[in-house]
Every structure is written in structure tokens, then in C-alpha cells.
Image (tube, helix red, strand yellow):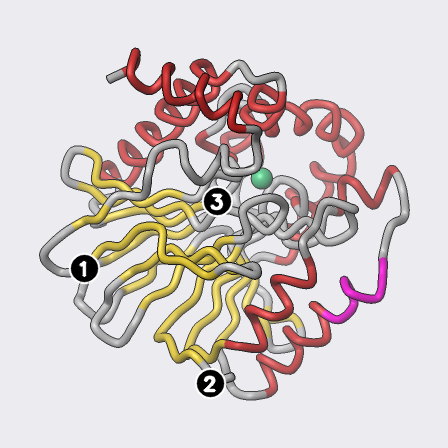
Amino acid sequence: MSTLRFRSIFVSDVHLGTPDCQAAYLLDFLRSVRCETLYLVGDIVDLEALAQRLYWPPSHSAILVELVEIVRRGTRVVYLPGNHDAPLRALCGQRIGGIEVEWNAIHVAADGRRYRVAHGDEFDPEHIGRSWLTRVGDSAHRLMLWANRNFNRLRRQLRLAYLPLSIITKSRIAQALLYIRQYEARVAAAAREHGVDGHICGHIHFGGVREIDGVVYLNDGDWVEHCTALTEDEEGRMELLHWSEHRSRIGRVDASSVLASPAAGLAFASLSSEASDVVLRALKQAA
Ligand SMILES: [Mn+2]
């Protein structure tokens, strides 16, 4: 199979260390692509789950081995930890095994657009709220102490980060969509505040490409259910790809247009057709 070449690739919410991780599809994807910069946009290793139960099949080690190989090939790898790998935020500003660890990053696309990149749990007020960011300050040492001290309390709170998913599994679709829309709006508002052209995040396990009030919202999705990655080509065109037995382009942003990803198709693909009908009705009502 031929190798796909990209300028940059964004992957998040892999959740290594949990049985839900779709490691085989991700490994196939990583082995099928080449890029100059790979962004790991948080929740890569689920330290929160591993603290509760040790689960680590060989396929999860294979992902780490592949990441080492990607670094070795000369790809720049930037790791922006999320809430499920939050203890790694203590390493922000450092380079670990050739991987740059940062809270967030500014990605300048080939077309000159500037995107802020961060996992995105700070836009999810149900889980911790503003206290998370304001209390920490910017000292890595203080962050580490704070993370250690609050880790158990944090774990209880972080579980709420999956609110959208739990709502979806309960088939309360309209609320899930409302939650996702509110999240997207908060991310877009923050992008405007930062004066960037868009924001690239993950966290809510709902890949998405949208233009919201003049800024671009890009969510690279997850490798738990949807198996999606965000890619940038040499012209700065951003595409959301699904990668399993099927490979498809779900949404696209280029210099002149935004081809938004379908609102519900991605998130609800795994539900039964009956549930999908509910989704469609909810969508019609929302429209
Ligand atoms: Mn997350």
C-alpha cells in the first residue's frame, strides 16, 4: 500500500490502557502515513484508567514503539497532554525522548492560517471549570505538586468529561448535540479571543470541521469509537479522515471554503438504525 504524505497530522483521545482503545486501526494509520509534524492532542495514554486497573495489551505497546519510530524518522512530535494524561502536564516545556511536551501550541498552516492547538478539556466546564486553569499558575513544579495532591479528587471529577458519550449511550441525543454545540461555541469564542484563525482540539470524542462566526473549529475526534485524525496537506488544506476497514474524508477546510462534517453521522454511526432515526428527528427539530 502506498504511503500517504501530509504536512501535519493531529491525533487525540487514543486512551491507551483501556479496552476501548482501537489500537489496531491507529497502528495501521500511523504506519500508512508520513508527515513533518505529528501533534498528539491529549488523552493519548489514559493514566486515569491505568491508576484504577492495569490494562496493557501488546497492541498498546506497539503504538508507543511506532511513535518512537516516527520520532526516529525525523518527524517533529508535539504532545499536548489532556485530562486523562494530566500528570504529564508536569513535563510541559520539556522534551522527552525527542517529543516536545507543551500545554498548547500555535500551528501555522501552509496557507498562513494560525491555529491554536490544545486538548480542549478547559472548554468543558462540567468537569472542573475555571479553577483548573487559574489555580495552577505556570510553574511546572507547582503543577506537579498540585496534580499529585488533587489527583484522586481530580479523577472523580474528570469522569464527567465523558458526559457527551454517556448521554449518547443513553440515547438522549438532543441533549448530546446541544452539549456538543455549546462546546464548539466555547472553543470558537476562545479562538477569537486569542486572535487566531481557528482552534484544533479533541476531548469530546466527536470529530468535527465547522466554521463558527468567522473562526474554524477543528476537532480531530478519537480512536475509541470513531477512529479519526485531522490531516494538513502541503497547501494547508485540513481534512478530517476516518480510518478503519473503511477510509473516508469527513470534513475539509481549504483556503476558499469550509466543507463542514455531517452533524450527527460520525458520532452516531455505531448506533442502531432505530437510534439514528431518533437522531435525525432531533436534528430536524433543532434546525
Ligand atoms: Mn479528554
Per the image, label 1 sits on a secondary structure element best described as loop
Q: Position of residue 5 (x, y in %)?
A: 39, 80
| Front tag of 3 and 2 | 2
Per the image, label 3 sits on a secondary structure element best described as loop
Q: Is residue 252 left or right of residue 176?
A: left
Q: Position of residue 133 (x, y in %)?
A: 51, 33
Q: Which mark is residue 27?
A: none
Q: Which mark is residue 202?
A: 3
Task: Identify the residue at the far left of this view.
Answer: 256
Q: Amino acid at mark 2?
A: Ser
| Front tag of 1 and 3 | 1
- Whichever of labels 1 and 3 marks the residue nearer the N terminus, that label is 3
Residue shown at 30% from the left, 72% from the top:
233
Q: Give neighbour class at mark 1: few <14, some 14-19, many 20+ (Cα, 10 Å).
A: some
Q: Amino acid at mark 1?
A: Asp
89 relative to 157, above or below: below
61 in magenta: yes
- Whichever of labels 2 and 1 marks the residue nearer the N terminus, that label is 2
Q: Position of residue 160 (x, y in %)?
A: 63, 23
Residue shown at 68% from the left, 23% from the top:
157
In which quadrant of the rendered image does the C terminus lie?
Answer: top left
Task: For marks 3 and 2, give the CA distance.
Answer: 28 Å
Residue shown at 52% from the left, 45% from the top:
138
Q: Nearer the viewer, residue 114 or 151?
A: 114
Q: Amino acid at mark 3?
A: Gly
Q: Count the labels in the image.
A: 3
Q: What residue does disc 1 label?
A: 254
Q: Nearer the viewer, residue 122 or 75?
A: 75
Q: What residue does disc 2 label?
A: 2
263 in magenta: no
Residue shown at 66% from the left, 78% from the top:
68
Q: Nearer the viewer, residue 60 or 76?
A: 60
